Image (cartoon, rainbow, N blue to C red):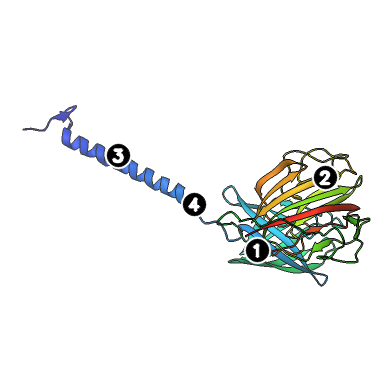
Amino acid sequence: MKNLSVGGILPVSRFFRIQIILLMAVFSAFSASAQNFISSGQSKDPDVVGRWDITMQKDGKSIPSWLEVQKSGTHTLIGRFTYAFGSARPISEVKPDGGKFSFSIPPQWESGTRNMDFEFEVSGDQIKGTMVYTDGLTCNWTGVRAPKMVRDKAPVWGKPYKLFNGKNTRGWHTDGKNQWIVENGILKSPHSGSNIISDKTFNDFKLHVEFRYQQGSNSGVYLRGRYECQIIDTKSGDPEPINNQFSAIYGVLPPNKMMAKDPGQWQTYDITMVGRLVTVVANGKTVICNAEIPGITGGAINSKEGEPGPILFQGDHGPIDFRNIVITEGK
């Protein structure tokens, strides 16, 4: 049988063979392009990306700090930084340069107007660098990759017990000259002074605490001594639920509703801490629900996030009263 022709030019079998070859070529080109796209989308991030627990050496002291670096788009690096005090502040760009990185941030609560300039390098899970402070002096710092702190299973809760005995400050110590007193079952800081810290340290826990502040006063409950749940006279100031006001995890997690009462009234926090996940119930309302705390907040006792830590009450920002401090430990 003779081959039929198409338009009198090509035999049918040869025509189909050419069509198949063309389709295969197009499919191959498409597959290569798709593979390149997938590969570029899954390329390994630079080692600097992640969260870092940092210790500064400044003025003869070890100062806890924290750094987060994220990838923005295809190649730009951005981040956040927490110094010894204040809140996490944004980094508009972390600039790579020959294996090193740098960024600059304006002062927050620091004296002076000069930016704080950072330069550093990363080696695996280690980081080290320098900071030029707002006074122009340079200090060195080192750090490690922050632990994920993910729990494999839910904790088994023990029996609640009183962390404050209502009689004296036994089981507690201060980080300076002690101004704390106990009167009628109330732990009081009548004026600004030292913070008070539990002798005992904790991993996962549930904490119930009642507190009372005067108008314009400010305090905080530090979870494991590293993450501040803010106490501040917000109702007579700014009522917006932002991340540096009443019941926020200072500078990183805002409450979903402002539940502050008027100054002079007793108020409550019920806080659950499991790994990095925190739930805050303020005056009976869940305002933060099982949210991740990314890193330490300003005023942390250290940056050793993977270790147990104490309960700390801030006493250096004005008068504050506490009572009925009850904790339940998880295992």
Q: Which residue is mark 1?
A: 306
Q: Residues within 10 Å of mark 3 (few under 14, many from 20)?
A: few
Residue at the spot of label 2: 267
Instruction: Kindly report which numbered mark, 1 or 2, lies closer to the viewer in this rendering.
Output: 2
- Residue at the spot 52% in from the left edge and 56% down from the top edge: 44
Image position, residue 177 (x, y; %): 91, 66
| Dot 4: element | loop
Q: Can you give x and y, in whole percent of width and height, for residue 185 in the image? A: 87, 55
Q: CA distance from mark 1 to mark 3?
A: 57 Å
68 or 196, which is in the foreground? 196
Q: Is residue 109 in view?
A: yes
Q: From the image, which quarter does the C terminus lie in?
A: bottom right
Whether pointer 2 and pointer 4 mark residues with C-beta atoms closer than 8 Å, the reply is no
Q: Is residue 59 left or right of residue 33?
A: right
Q: CA distance from mark 1 to mark 2?
A: 31 Å
Q: Residues within 10 Å of mark 4 (few under 14, many from 20)?
A: few
- Mark nearer the N terminus (4 vs 1): 4
Q: Nearer the viewer, mark 2 or mark 4?
A: 2
Q: What percent of the width, then of the height, locates residue 193?
A: 91, 60
Instruction: Work out how far the residue at label 2 is from the one at label 3, CA to CA, in angstroms.
Output: 73 Å
* Label 2, residues with CA under 10 Å away: few <14, some 14-19, many ≥20: many
Q: Which residue is mark 4?
A: 42
* C-beta proximity under 8 Å, tags 4 and 1: no
Q: How far is the residue under mark 4 from the one under mark 3?
A: 28 Å
Mark 2 and mark 4: Cα distance apart in space:
49 Å
Label 4 is placed on what type of residue?
Gln
Rendered image: mark on residue 97: none
- Of badges 1 and 3, nearer the viewer stands 1
